[in-house]
């Protein structure tokens, strides 16, 4: 009888311990759920994007388009001195308003390029430069002419591509896989600055302020030049960090198979480290 009572007592203690453990687990789970449920108040949970129509037949282009294509050819001849050019894989759509809105499609791959009149829509562009000036192309030709790029020259080039580059980042395919997007931890209202550490001036001789505002409205990402309003967060990047962002999202993620979860996690960790290193303001801190 004593042994039976002792056994019953042991079972009762185990039951109590099990109930205590369940209670603890419940409390921990409740805390985790509470944290998760507060996330939607800050981070964007879903994204959607328009599918723009880029088709612009060559016959619709003004004669001035030949000036743009000719200058691109001159620039291409100089890129042969730069090994990194052979690593590029881009489709760039450019428009030059000062030349009767001449439009050109530039395809770059394997160290070669083609430039055709109009905007082709047979595949998705990687960059859309909707406001390019001939002065920008002339400067690029000048920069490449001596066979090397200085840091101020890199900044001047990156400044032209800041808004188009951000548009490319926020429409990258990697962001649009199915599922809740809160794990990417993107805020609704973001400001970005490319640091002008070299006092670079624009074509008119004014000090360049390379800034942009990124907004999410009903899931759609929109990018505007300059800083607008008071953001949720602000990021400040140098040239190398800007290149790292673009290369990570538009090259590294693009090369990883969807099924390779480990590789994707490693890239995501790299992305989050870069985000942390470039964050300079948050209204939540």
Image (tube, rainbow, N blue to C red):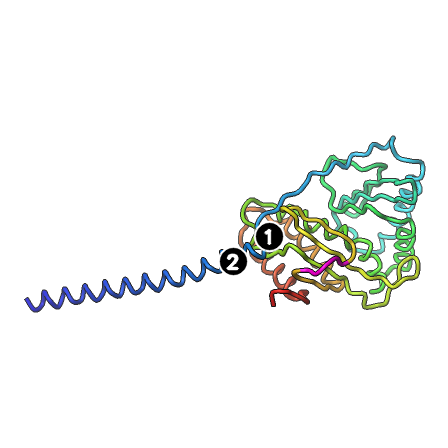
Q: Position of residue 30 (x, y in %)?
A: 41, 60
Q: Residue at x 90, y 43 (%)?
A: 68
Of residues 263 and 280, the one drawn nearer to the viewer in this rendering = 280
Q: Classify residue 277 as left or right of residue 262.
A: right
| Local SS, label 2 | helix
Q: Is residue 238 above or below residue 265?
A: below
Q: Dividing the image into 4 quarters, which one contains the N terminus?
A: bottom left
Q: In front: mark 1 or mark 2?
A: 2
Q: Which residues are magenta?
A: 227-231
Of the two numbered discs 1 and 2 on the same chain, state the one appearing first in sequence. 2
Query: In the rendered picture of this protein, how many numbered marks are placed on residues?
Result: 2
> Is 276 colored magenta in this rendering?
no
Magenta span: chief secondary structure? loop
Q: Is residue 14 above or below residue 264?
A: below
Q: Residue at x 75, y 50 (%)?
A: 88
Q: Position of residue 218 (x, y in %)?
A: 63, 46
- Disc number at residue 209? none
Q: Classify residue 173 as left or right of residue 89.
A: left
Give the residue number, with chain letter if any, for mark 2: 38
- Disc number at residue 44? 1
């Amino acid at each position: 009888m004593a042994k039976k009572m002792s056994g019953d007592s042991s079972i009762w203690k185990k039951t109590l311990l099990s109930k205590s453990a369940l209670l603890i687990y419940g409390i921990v789970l409740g805390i985790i759920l509470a944290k998760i449920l507060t996330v939607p108040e800050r981070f964007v949970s879903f994204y959607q994007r328009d599918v723009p129509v880029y088709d612009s037949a060559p016959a619709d282009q003004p004669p001035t388009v030949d000036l743009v294509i000719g200058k691109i050819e001159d620039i291409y001849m100089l890129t042969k001195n730069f090994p990194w050019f052979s690593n590029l894989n881009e489709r760039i759509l450019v428009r030059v308003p000062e030349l009767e809105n001449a439009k050109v499609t530039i395809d770059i791959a394997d160290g070669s390029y083609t430039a055709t009149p109009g905007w082709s829509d047979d595949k998705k562009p990687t960059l859309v430069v909707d406001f390019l000036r001939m002065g920008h192309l002339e400067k690029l030709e000048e920069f490449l002419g001596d066979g090397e790029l200085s840091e101020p020259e890199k900044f001047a080039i990156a400044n032209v591509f800041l808004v188009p580059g951000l548009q490319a980042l926020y429409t990258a395919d990697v962001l649009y896989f199915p599922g809740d997007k809160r794990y990417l931890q993107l805020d609704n209202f973001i400001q970005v600055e490319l640091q002008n550490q070299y006092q670079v001036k624009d074509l008119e001789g004014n000090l360049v302020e390379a800034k942009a505002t990124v907004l999410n409205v009903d899931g759609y990402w929109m990018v505007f030049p300059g800083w607008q309003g008071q953001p949720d967060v602000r990021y400040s990047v140098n040239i190398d960090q800007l290149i790292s962002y673009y290369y990570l999202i538009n090259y590294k993620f693009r090369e990883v198979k969807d099924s390779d979860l480990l590789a994707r996690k490693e890239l995501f960790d790299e992305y989050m480290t870069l985000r942390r290193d470039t964050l300079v303001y948050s209204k939540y801190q």
